[in-house]
Image: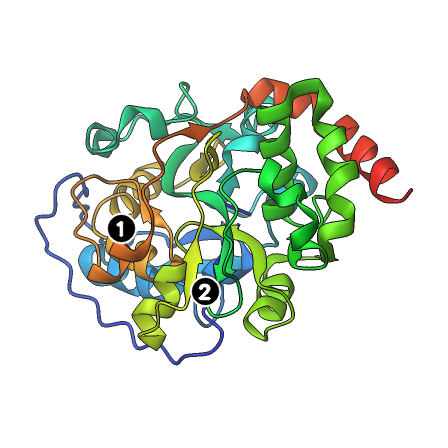
Amino acid sequence: MNYRILLTTVFLAVIMSFSATAAGTAEIENNDVTHLTVYAYDSFVGEWGPGTAIAQAFEEKTGIRVDMVSAGNGGELLTRLEFEKSAPKADVIIGISEELTSRAIDSGLLEPYSSPVLDQIPHHLIFDSTHTLLPFDYGAYSFVYDSHALTEVPSSLEDLLDPKYQGKIIIMDPRTSSVGMGLLQWTIAVYGEEYLEWWEKVKDNLLTIADGWSSGYGLFTEGEAPLVLSYTTSPVYHKMWEESDRYQATVFEEGNYLAIEGVGILKSSANREEAEAFIDFLLSDAQRDVATTNIMFPVNRNTVLDKAFSIAPEVTRTLLLDNELVSNMRDAWVDEWVEVMSR
């Protein structure tokens, strides 16, 4: 994930009602059960994230207490686990994106879990065949535009190079933002070894390169530029909480790059059964709350979405680089990007 949509402007009252017989969620006798410690990315645990509501609902269902710990974003989550390797504290980790799969597996800190709920998840979203990381939400990167300010909408990465977009595009830095890294991988998936040519040409059309999604998207909604790197689901937030369809997402001819977030169990966990039950819960009962709070698609095909999700355009072609390739080349790609962008 890591790439997220943060609810920062509207007070959200989450009312959750979960069925005790929901498919795939394990029931556990909770006499003297030790509580779970779950590490997650900052916005998941934050005031507007789904973490607190999910933890409370899980405790109500099973009697198992969940301590949600904000542990950074993206690679910072894994870095913290690696730092604590000699004295591990977490049982479950939430928010490791598909691009970090190889690093997560190679760390030896996580243990595979073949949840029974995987049967309810489309196969193309199961990005880790070892089941060390299980997907819990997903989306596709997109350039979101302000329909009140932009009349000619791009339909490809190549369109973004047109001089008519000079100073009109906001993106994020791949060194500090998972969304920015998503765009870098998107260009590599489309252009291959010639990807740097696109970056060289797009520079004049950029208003700014933000350090993170929140700051970049904030500039966009403040009217600083009519195009911003985000997700195809971003307009759902505005439709759901502002009743506005002003902001729209693009679907590109060459395809949109996929973003999938995963959850895993720490090998060192002394609460394996409870950790499995929590993951089953996250992949079943909690899916609607994940969708409406993270503004991402739930992976469970049985989830009933809020009608606001109809504003998100259908992506007919998704792109995703091989996990091992990303792991091996990530640092080199970033170094090459910095060289080009600093010229």
User: Is residue 91 at all visible to an observer of this figure?
Assistant: no
Task: Name above or below for residue 151 compared with residue 221.
Answer: above
Name the disc covering residue 222, or none: none
Residue found at the far bottom of this picture:
11
Which residue is located at x 12 percent, y 47 percent? 22
Which residue is located at x 66 percent, y 45 percent? 162
Q: Position of residue 88 (x, y in %)?
A: 58, 42
Could you tell me how far apart the alpha carbons at marks 1 and 2 are, in whole angstroms?
30 Å
Name the disc covering residue 287, or none: 1
How many numbered marks have been drawn onto this rendered protein structure?
2
Q: Which residue is mark 2?
A: 147
Contact check, label 1 and label 2, Cβ < 8 Å: no
Secondary structure state at the residue bearing disc 1: helix
Q: Camera-side residue: 328 or 75? A: 328
Q: Position of residue 57 (x, y in %)?
A: 25, 62
Which residue is located at x 39 percent, y 25 percent? 131
Residue found at the far right of this picture:
343
Task: Name above or below for residue 215 compared with residue 19.
Answer: below
